[in-house]
Amino acid sequence: MRIFDNLWITHYYFFYDLFVYYVSPKCLEALTQCVLQYTLSIKEALLQVGFNLEVSYGISLNYAPHTHKIATFIHKDIPIEWYFGSYEYYLEHKQKVLGDRVLIAPWILIDFFVSKKVALFLSGIVPKLSCEKKIVIGMGHSIAEAFMFFPKALKQEYLQQYIGYYFLGFDYYLAIDRASLKAYESIFQSVGVKTKAIAGGSPRLDLKLEQSCALRSIEQFLFIPRLTKPYELMGIIKRLLELGKKVLFRPHPAYRGYYQWVGKQNPYACLEVFLSYAGFSFDESESITLDSLSKSIVITDNSSLSYSAPLSSLKPVILYAPPKKEFDLRVCNFDCSFVNPLLHRVALNELEFMQVALRLEEELKQSGELIAQEILQYKEANIFYPKASALEIAKLLMSLLKS
């Protein structure tokens, strides 16, 4: 089944995603009721051609390579429904879902159209549109997601409203490690969210950690920002290059994709001035290589790499994050911090960055093996179900289906 997007639904998505902090609940509810009328009309039209949306026995999964791995452990007699956010993505992977029910629809409408008793959604902020009795489990894409609420410099009422809507559609939310489980529990208790945090691990992270790279000498500084704008990095990149350091810059695909979507010029063009330096280059590879991580000091901000990179490379990353409303590392909401001192070094301005970067470079030369061992021990003690999370999540889904 394919539900086509339209401009009205796209506006709903952006309105819900961007303004859910500030808009009154009455306004959001009124808008959601309008969308519900739209979805109900689709349901009625489907019924007229014999397509039933009533919830039935089975498991719904957002399609991704790591959720497909989960499905391989689900018993063959359990019906599976796959959700795709776009027809193009479905065409790429349709051979892997042959024989299963398939739903293609805008993400913002997913709660209404999934039709199995148990559903696993990727990421939060899903409007609650369905009154059908389902068990919905959320699975974020990174450990960093659990900590993203702590450094937001917002009024508490706005932050709590956002958190309430972020988890509104979920009965359970999977935590990847012990620290993120504690973080979710703290948030849910503080805000009064009914969602229950539960140990789950991450098949996506398992693959990265299985390929953890051996310790190597530091050859370069690797910039992988998500929130920080390219022009905000020009000063520190120039200073590193003037010191004779090698700098590799990796554009964030989501940031570049957004600019292409809104029709603006390449946001990374300002960095091309550094191509005159022999030590500067762009990393345009499809994915970050282990070789690159192993010989780099990584500089990022609120990216998922802020947690996965140190666990893979066994060395701290630098969080270079000039304070913004969305990500201010001076803020510790719910008495919790985004920063893990073992995994992160923090710089909030250019002067701090140069001090932190050169100190970390020297620290890794002198004590790199000891730091790597400490991070390895931390990883082994804290990650849930390493190398076996797909199986454990499948067991959880099947257990909930029986309940």
Image: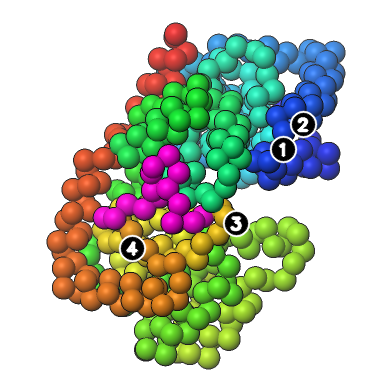
Q: Which mark is residue 27?
A: 2
The residue that mark 3 highlights is 254
Q: Nearer the viewer, residue 324 or 197?
A: 324
Helix, strand or loop at mark 2: helix
Q: Main secondary structure of the magenta part?
A: loop
CA neighbours of label 2 inside 10 A, class few (<14), some (14 to 19), many (20+): few
Q: Is residue 78 visible?
A: yes
Amino acid type at circle 3 is: Ala
Q: Contact (CB < 8 A) between labels 3 and 4?
A: no
Disc nearer the start of the sequence (4/1): 1
Q: In the image, what residue occupies the spot 58% across and 27% down?
A: 168
Q: In the image, what residue occupies the spot 44% across and 8% down?
A: 403
Q: Is residue 42 visible?
A: no
Q: Contact (CB < 8 A) between labels 2 and 1?
A: yes
Amino acid type at circle 4 is: Arg
The residue that mark 1 highlights is 23
The quarter of the rendered structure image containing the N terminus is top right
- On screen, residue 55 versus residue 76, left or right, reads right
Disc nearer the start of the sequence (4/2): 2
- On screen, residue 184 versus residue 358, left or right, reads right
Amino acid type at circle 1 is: Val
Please give the range of residues in magenta: 327-342
Real-space CA distance between mark 4 and mark 2, rounded to the nearest whole angstrom: 42 Å
